[in-house]
């Protein structure tokens, strides 16, 4: 048999997730979520239940970001879920951007209907409807107007961790859900330049989290006018490339100018004794980041967690046959030693088969899997496998050596994951000279982004409109590295 025939006759490798990424990326994505036990659909259309393992992941991301937000002087606060319709209506451009996504509360009481079922009481209609917050610029702006009186009250730096609701027609877990979790920052300043600087500073805070915690190397840049946040002077973003070549808007930061400040009368008395209108910013990062994490790093066997934000950094799996009490006790001592070093450890002492325990750790994306049987225990050794490298990384070392090097192994995996993300993204950005080149690229099922001169799409809006319609592409951002001269085009989530 020739080498070529052997390749043809060889059965495809069995994977934990079917279909695979290559076969059906959207179904593969849902399969990873289910296999990793991150979340599930809820009885409420478009909403999800985040399961404990998935929420532990979000908490680790949240903790890292919250520390960085506080480190730049921002304070956490909380504002109402319900926003008066009149507040939203004050900012016309803003409401135009969100009107079709708003959920409206119109009654404050239920009563039994003619068929014995509960209905909104006709006598309990609200004088003014409330909007379930799609974002909080307006309700926070109302408080800012009360809290800011003098230049001494500036800057006012606020953040809230909350849920928001935007009625989603095509929901997909973590990526697009009617209700999702996020943080939204809202800052007020005396000058335009302070607001611009803040907008940029907070995007770099986000980029720090994406690169150094989520191991995702995205592209920072400014949104074009057609993609800008409703009511903003400028919007900047991180556009991350997923494994299928599509873009994920990973987060955004906005310079709102004086639009919202004028609508809500956010003013301060300056050193000159005169009243001046503030300049405001807003910036947000959501559970969409979990979707980006999956689509950036997971493989056909399940999730692959970057060590810094993994709920379990090390999974210890006792390999036992009959009475495994001694091996399990040994593993418990190892787990305790690792915890003393600050490692997040999971010891799987269940009565499941060893192979099932291994596959559970693989599908959940635990960065480092440790296997210990009777022989390893007797010899003072253990075997460890990196999730991102699989069996090729299988290494047997002494227990004390492992304790001394485990953090270095995790750090190497974190760095390798970021490098692979950066290399993949940079390797799939394609310079194009004409819109015809862009058309040919996407007609040919090209993977990744096209980069073109910004004037190319701006000077031929009808030509670009046709491309958008045919290929479902959009302006992603004008990368900072190109100083606005180039724009990325791509399909997106």
Image: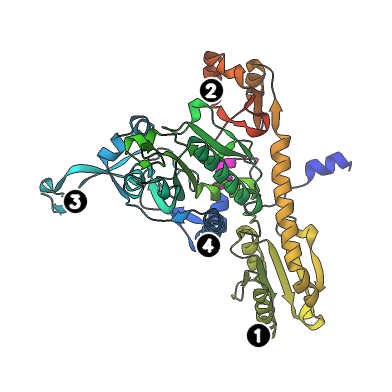
Q: Quadrant of residue 355?
A: bottom right
In the image, residue 446 sits, relative to residue 255, either above or below, namely: above
Query: Helix or strand or loop: what does disc 3 sit on?
Result: loop
Give the x, y percent position of residue 118: 17, 52
Identity of the residue drawn at 64% across and 36% down? 245
Residues at marks 4 and 2, CA–CA distance in whole angstroms: 38 Å
In the image, residue 437 sits, relative to residue 71, either above or below, namely: above
Q: State the colouring used for the structure image.
A: rainbow
Q: In the drawing, what numbered circle is on residue 468?
A: 2
Residue holding disc 3: 108
Query: Is tag 1's residue or tag 2's residue first in the polypeptide sequence?
Result: 1
Q: Quadrant of residue 145?
A: top left
* Residue 236 in view of the camera: yes
Query: Helix or strand or loop: what does disc 4 sit on?
Result: helix
In the image, residue 322 sits, relative to residue 437, either above or below, namely: below
Query: Is tag 4's residue or tag 2's residue first in the polypeptide sequence?
Result: 4
Residues at marks 3 and 4, CA–CA distance in whole angstroms: 35 Å
- Mark 4–mark 2 CB contact (< 8 Å): no
Residues at marks 3 and 2, CA–CA distance in whole angstroms: 44 Å
Residue holding disc 4: 56
Q: In the drawing, what numbered circle is on residue 249?
A: none
Span colored in magenta = 21-30
Residues at marks 1 and 3, CA–CA distance in whole angstroms: 59 Å
Residue holding disc 1: 325
Query: Is tag 4's residue or tag 1's residue first in the polypeptide sequence?
Result: 4
Q: Nearer the viewer, residue 103 or 66?
A: 66
Q: Main secondary structure of the magenta part?
A: helix
């Amino acid at each position: 048999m020739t080498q070529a025939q052997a390749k043809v006759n060889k059965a495809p490798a069995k994977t934990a997730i079917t279909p695979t990424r290559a076969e059906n990326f959207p179904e593969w994505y849902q399969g990873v979520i289910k296999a990793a036990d991150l979340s599930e659909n809820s009885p409420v259309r478009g909403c999800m239940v985040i399961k404990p393992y998935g929420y532990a992941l979000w908490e680790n991301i949240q903790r890292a970001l919250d520390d960085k937000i506080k480190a730049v002087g921002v304070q956490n606060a909380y504002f109402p879920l319900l926003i008066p319709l009149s507040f939203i209506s004050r900012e016309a451009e803003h409401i135009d951007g969100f009107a079709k996504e708003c959920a409206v509360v119109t009654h404050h009481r239920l009563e039994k209907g003619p068929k014995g079922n509960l209905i909104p009481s006709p006598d309990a209609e609200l004088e003014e409807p409330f909007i379930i917050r799609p974002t909080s610029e307006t309700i926070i702006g109302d408080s800012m107007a009360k809290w800011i009186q003098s230049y001494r009250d500036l800057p006012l730096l606020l953040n809230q961790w909350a849920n928001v609701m935007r009625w989603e027609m095509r929901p997909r877990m973590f990526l697009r859900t009617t209700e999702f979790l996020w943080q939204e920052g809202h800052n007020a300043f005396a000058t335009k330049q302070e607001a611009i600087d803040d907008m940029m500073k907070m995007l770099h805070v986000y980029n720090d989290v994406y690169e150094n915690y989520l191991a995702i190397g995205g592209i920072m840049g400014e949104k074009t006018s057609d993609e800008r946040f409703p009511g903003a002077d400028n919007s900047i973003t991180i556009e991350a490339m997923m494994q299928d070549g599509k873009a994920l808007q990973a987060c955004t930061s906005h310079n709102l100018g004086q639009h919202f400040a004028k609508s809500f009368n956010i003013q301060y008395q300056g050193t000159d004794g005169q009243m001046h209108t503030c300049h405001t910013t807003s910036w947000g990062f959501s559970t969409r980041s979990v979707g980006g994490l999956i689509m950036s790093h997971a493989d056909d066997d399940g999730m692959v967690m970057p060590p810094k934000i993994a709920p379990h950094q090390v999974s210890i799996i006792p390999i036992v046959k009959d009475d495994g009490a001694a091996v399990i006790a040994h593993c418990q001592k190892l787990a305790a030693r690792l915890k003393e070093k600050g490692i997040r450890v999971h010891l799987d002492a269940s009565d499941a088969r060893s192979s099932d325990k291994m596959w559970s750790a693989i599908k959940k994306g635990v960065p480092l899997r440790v296997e210990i049987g009777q022989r390893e225990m007797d010899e003072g050794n253990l075997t460890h496998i990196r999730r991102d490298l699989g069996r090729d990384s299988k290494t047997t070392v002494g227990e004390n050596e492992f304790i001394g090097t485990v953090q270095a192994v995790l750090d190497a995996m974190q760095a390798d994951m970021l490098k692979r993300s950066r290399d993949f993204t940079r390797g799939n950005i394609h310079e194009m000279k004409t819109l015809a080149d862009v058309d040919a690229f996407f007609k040919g099922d090209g993977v990744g982004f096209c980069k073109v001169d910004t004037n190319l799409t701006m000077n031929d809006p009808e030509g670009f409109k046709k491309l958008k319609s045919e290929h479902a592409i959009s302006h992603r951002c004008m990368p900072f590295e190109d100083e606005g001269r180039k724009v990325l085009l791509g399909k997106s989530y």
